[in-house]
Amino acid sequence: ENRIALVIGNSAYQANKPLNNPVNDAQAVSQMLNQAGFEVVMAFDLSRDIMKQTVEEFAARILEKGSNTIVMIYYAGHGMQVDGENYLIPIDAKFQAEGDLPEQGVKLADVVAALEATQTKARIVVVDACRNNPFGGSAADDAGGFALVDAPEGALIAYSTAPGTVAFDGLGKHSPYAAAFMRPARPPNLPVEQVFKKVRLLVNESTDKKQTPWDSARLNTDFVFFANAETPAPAAVVPVKVAVADLGSRPARQAYDIVIAEDSEEYYEEFVRVYQADPLADHIRRLLNRRKQMQAWQVVTHRNRAEDYA
């Protein structure tokens, strides 16, 4: 199995205050992926032209690897959405209005499409963006953050925060998301879907419930970052999934961890119904309401009809 990864860290923004951690995050994630058997292409502080060129050259390298290849992109830096379209922000971006973004940013969909054009075993895209956005939020989304996007077939797309919300750059050496990602990715034989469930729990805990990562997975193959035939998969890394109907049999805090790990409307709605008087239910309500808003916005932007925006 071939493994190749592109890791981008944008910190040195020219028109806004530089970010402290994306380059640090990219370096640390690159080191971990290299240890996991990835051929890693690192790129730091990219202008728009260089960023697009880097993605194109990376896609060309994937073609040389063949179909038995795991491909990963990890991006750390600024990102935002306008009219339901998500953009990664290069360091030379300068715009006064949201209408300038298509000419200043790099469309995330184009990055994903560059990977889709290649025949690979699996594609993983991790976006640690929307960090305290200095560029301002979307007119349709005053909280900022990315729009809701579903992963294409054979891919997993992970975001550092829920749709329509912002992420923290972090006060330490790494962002809360990068620091969390590097912990559960290391235990041997842990399926990648379980890794991101654990990341969601860790980030939610470390940010006092202010940031909840989100992911969409449609992988057609099993994948672990580190494999060891002699070591069993770690037990109880994430809460054991229980049926929605049985959620009420658990203490509120345990049920909270379960629904955060599962991150689905069905589980959120049941938690709010069963534990409506518990303080934790307020946070779940906010997550649920924001998810429904972003789903409605996704429908509107896909239809793109004037009457739907009214």
Image: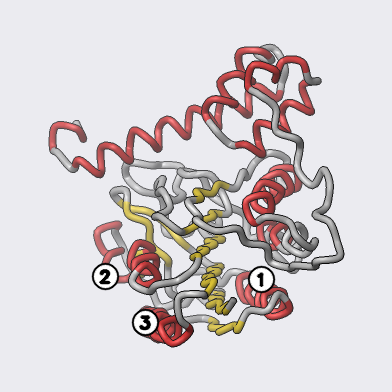
Judge depth for marks 1 and 3 and give the one in front.
Answer: 3
In three-dimensional space, the C-alpha distance between marks 2 and 1, rounded to whole angstroms, equals 27 Å
First in sequence: mark 2 vs mark 3: 3
Residue located at (64% from left, 16% from top):
245
Mark 3, Cα crowd under 10 Å, few <14 / some 14-19 / many 20+, is some
Secondary structure at badge 2 equals helix
Looking at the image, how many numbered discs can be counted on the residues? 3
First in sequence: mark 2 vs mark 1: 1
Image x and y of residue 154, in percent: 45, 58
Q: Which mark identifies residue 56?
A: 3
User: Which residue has dot 2 on it?
Assistant: 103
Q: Nearer the viewer, residue 27 or 93?
A: 27
Q: Nearer the viewer, residue 209 or 17?
A: 209
Q: Which mark identifies residue 177?
A: none
Q: Is residue 156 above or below residue 288?
A: below
Mark 2, Cα crowd under 10 Å, few <14 / some 14-19 / many 20+, is few
